[in-house]
Amino acid sequence: MGIFSSQKDTMRAPSTGRINRSKPVTFTFDGKRYQGFEGDTIASALLANNVHLVGRSFKYHRPRGIMASGSEEANALVRVGKGAYAEPNLRATQVEIYDGLYAESQNRFPSLKVDVGAVNSLLSRFFPAGFYYKTFMWPASLWMTYEHVIRNAAGLGRVADDPNDPDRYEHTHAHCEVLIAGGGAAGLMAALQAAKSGARVILADEQNELGGWLLGESDVMIDNKPADSWIAAQVAALSAMDNVTLLPRTTVFGYGDHNFITMCERVTDHMGTRPAHLPRQRLWKIRATEVILATGAHERPLVFSGNDLPGVMLSGAGRTYANRFGALPGRRVIITTNNDDAYRTAIALQKQGVMVRSIADIRANPKGPLISAAKEAGIEVLAGHAVTVAAGNLRVGRVEICPVNADASSVTGEALHRDCDLVLMSGGLSPAVHLHSQARGKLKWDEKTLCFRPSTYHEREQSAGAANGTFDIAKLLAEAVKVASKALTRQGLSAEDVSVPESSAPKQSFAPIAAWKIANGLPAGQGDKAFVDFQNDVTGSDIQLAVREGYHSVEHVKRYTTNGMATDQGKTSNINALGILANSLQNEIPNVGTTTFRMPYTPTSIGAIAGRDIKGLFDPVRRTRMDSWHQQAGATFEHVGQWMRAWYYPQAGESMEDAVNREVVAARTTAGLLDASTLGKIDIRGKDAAEFLNRVYTNAWLKLGIGRCRYGLMLKDDGMVMDDGVTTRLGENHFHMTTTTGGAAGVLDWLEEWHQTEWPELEVYMTSVTEQWSVATLSGPLARQILSEAGCDTDLSDGAFPFMSMKESHVAGIPARLFRISFTGELSYEINVPARYGLALWTALMKAGKPHGITPYGTEAMHVLRAEKGFIIVGQETDGTVTSTDLGMQWIVSAKKPDFIGKRALERKSMASTDRKQLVGLVTKDPKKVIPEGAHAVLDPTEPAPMTMLGQVTSSYWSPNLNHSIAMGLLKNGHALKGQTVYFPMLDGQEPIEATITDTVFYDPKGERING
Amino acid sequence: MLLINCPHCGARDEAEFSCGGEAHIARPLAENSINDTQFADYLFFRHNPKGIFLERWRHAAGCRKWFNAVRDTVTDEIIEIYPMGGLPKSKAGKQAHAENWRRASAAEKAAMPATKGKK
């Protein structure tokens, strides 16, 4: 057999199971190759190879095996795949094998069989409940050290080695009248009924095939057929219906408001060769009118010493492995139970040739056909007994079975010793109410079946079958039809009831006896640990300890012990923990209450949640029509909102500083050309357009002449600056508004809000035209000459075309709107052309300007140029806490207008407080020193920390035109401090920078250059 | 994720909408003589009930129209959708509108009678 595990280890049942025995599959686990069959999971294939040890536990590094057969698995977490494809924390019980599958165990070092971390187990008396809180609180200064060690030692799997996930994920949206979560007997029956109405039905199930628990039952007949034949027939019938979508391998993991359902479909995870056209996983977002939860139930473990050893398994899981996968989890079996269901497992295993040695039943006098059948089959039934201790080295090898009292809280007699290689435990069933709970449904404790069942519903959902606490096959089939019928009639649909098929299963009681923590015959706290939460290593004693230490609320106990806080969210542990808590508090379970389940039901990959919204598709990138020219010119770009703007155009050998200085100087000596296409542009029309502008801007707009431009400042109604820009009157009832690049969308929304909600009586229409116009700003003393030489058919003389006016014209034959406005303080034209002519315009201007030394400049030079003039940038000089008064811009605030947005707020007394930060200029004593933006100003640099801070620098640049640095800042009471010296303390022992408070206009204070 | 019935486009996912907060806050005009404290009632103070709430919504990624809604903040049930400028018609909505402290505020009384909507 070579590298394969030896044949004698094979634990295949002779001839049963849903695996395809004609298709062997080879996979690797922890470096060793194993053989399974198509249809196996990693867990079933490992069990068939007699491998039980598959992982180490979270806190104590105890050896752990496979405990369950579905998504509730707490122990058998594996890392699947290599390199960038690796994914940790997958449940081996859910991962289907394929040829070449590579899996590793987790949380062990250096190997699974020899783990140095297991020393934690020997030190476990030092790792009690709340050990993080107790141990590492003191001294606080060492927390960083502790944390490093803890993070290395604790935790579950490792993420992929390469953070760039090469797989593709997709999102899909769907609507349906009835969504059914769970494709077991109840789910299928509900789907048949709902589909009969013709309504759209989606049925999703997390397993690879529909059928649920029935796939692992050998003793159920439906419609006179074995259960699996009945399933096959129903699945075939549903598949044939156009209105039904069946989604196996799809986990409903989230239940949101108004029946918003999220599910993750594992499209290719089970394939060795994955077709390129398919995504790895698909996230479904569904709006369902009605939801039926047929999510089944989880079996609970029993809490006894050593219950976490490999080879200790849930009874139903043992049955599933044997019946469904033909994988025998053991040869010599001991069963321990508090209910009837384990007897079905005993009988099923014995039929497969497994020796079931004993059933230890906590109930004093178990009765019924199943018990009789087990006895008749020669199985030893020990009533009033429990497995109290399981022991073994890396695998269970022997148990102690003791007579116990009614709730197994004390041992009442001598122990029996039994050898075994498998212990199956059954502690009763817990309906999987997770989605119901996510949907804000309430739960009720059922005293008879010892479980929480859905009671009241918040959303339009119902539970059916085991998820509703209805475990009997005949009853749940009838219930599913009833529930589906109600889901139809509640939305005005109808269908005749499908007939509920006859069914039979061994007669069984679904009333376990309460036995939450099983005594081991030793004083409390002694003997091996008895686990409640296997994934987070929480024992029954931990919960009792938490109660003794004063934690009584279920929410506190959960957080203190971490019970139910692992990736399985306590699917198998919550009820046992509650039972132990209630007993410790001498209270009843319903009074203790439950914690709330949150989404996701099972861990969901971030890739599926992100879908295609990654990398280049994460956020759109907007580029102007001149972009290709900027790229060819070697521009460096910066993000401005979603736009990519040319930042500066470095020439050979130039640093950023060199390039920006050259551009800044050129714009004031010859001419500069800026791509201003990204500026927000809003077309405003209507007979009340002027009145509307008059209300949204702080200054007066009614009398603005046609063809004239005006700068406007917008405030929010609290008086804080929101946006600014130049707006031009194109006609009596027609305006062209510009906004900041980043503020464009927000301003349009803002205008719409005021129009629709406050002034609906005004007739005004706003349309975004940002992308309809390409804009080149030609600025500098030679701007007029260059524009003229580019071929402009309008009189550009100052008299005919004055500052702050607009002309319709042609430039280089292109129809254009010329705006004579300036953000540099130089003679400047903003040339707007229909967007598609952008590059043609730019090229024509560059060509015409070449003999004159025209220089393209980027956003950095634009910032320097405007700062030289003291022009603000909203969002840089302002941050939502700055008023027009703070900026010293009272000149633009009308005192005459009866109202504008923000007017009343500016009049509030607090707006006149001397505490307010006001915008000032800052000139450094050493002209070469540029103050870092964000630096804080103080009056006394020798004051010990914490220093009294006046405010901060908002803009700061080297000005090559002035040959000294310039800065603006917001300083407390700054306007009154003009002429005073302030200091900017620096890091790393550098001397504070000394500066004088000045006006904000540094260059051409009289504004003489505006006419060229 | 709520399902919101836009009066113009029909039922759409909450992701398409933006919530504009409390509805029916009348905006006092500047010329009205209310003091800063009374003005603050308009500017800063928002109702935050556990239960029936009248709020403004905008179909931001759709028709971009504003409208009002009556929503129960406990159950997230949207009881009624009604136009901007209108008043709720449902019993719960009427009661919530009438019982809001704002109805007795000076800021509300200082608002121009013609002012509708939001605000």
Image (spheres, rainbow, N blue to C red):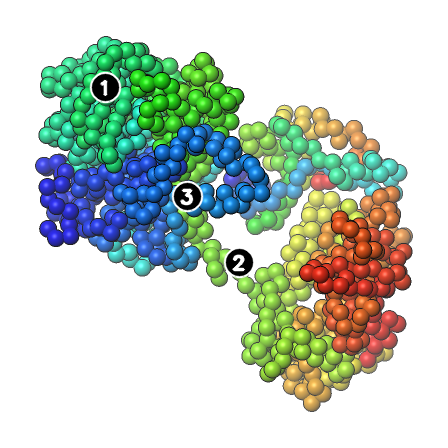
Cα–Cα span, label 1 and label 3: 35 Å
| Figure check: A785 above or below A226 | below
Mark 1 falls on what kind of element? strand
Quarter of the image for residue A286 reads top left
Say if mark 1 contacts mark 2, CB within 8 Å: no
Residue B108, picture quadrant: top right
**Label 2, on which residue?**
A619
* Residue A886 visible in the displayed image: no
* Left or right relative to A273: residue A129: right
Is the Cβ of the residue at disc 1 closer than 8 Å to that at disc 3?
Answer: no
Q: Nearer the viewer, mark 2 or mark 3?
A: 3
Q: Is B9 above or below relative to A934? A: above
**What amino acid type is highlighted by mark number 2?**
Asp
- Residue flagged by tag 3: what amino acid is it? Ala
Q: Is A244 rendered above or below residue A459?
A: below
Total labels drawn: 3
Residues B18 and B94: in front is B18
Earlier residue among tags 1 and 3: 3
- Nearer to us of marks 1 and 2 is 1
Residue A628 makes an appearance in the image = yes
Instruction: Determine the residue positioned at 79% across, 38% down.
Output: B40
Identify the disc placed on residue A153. 3
Res. A164 image quadrant: bottom left
SS at mark 2 in the image: loop
Dot 1 alpha-carbon crowd within 10 angstroms: few under 14, some 14 to 19, many 20 or more = many
Of helix, strand and loop, which one carries label 3?
helix
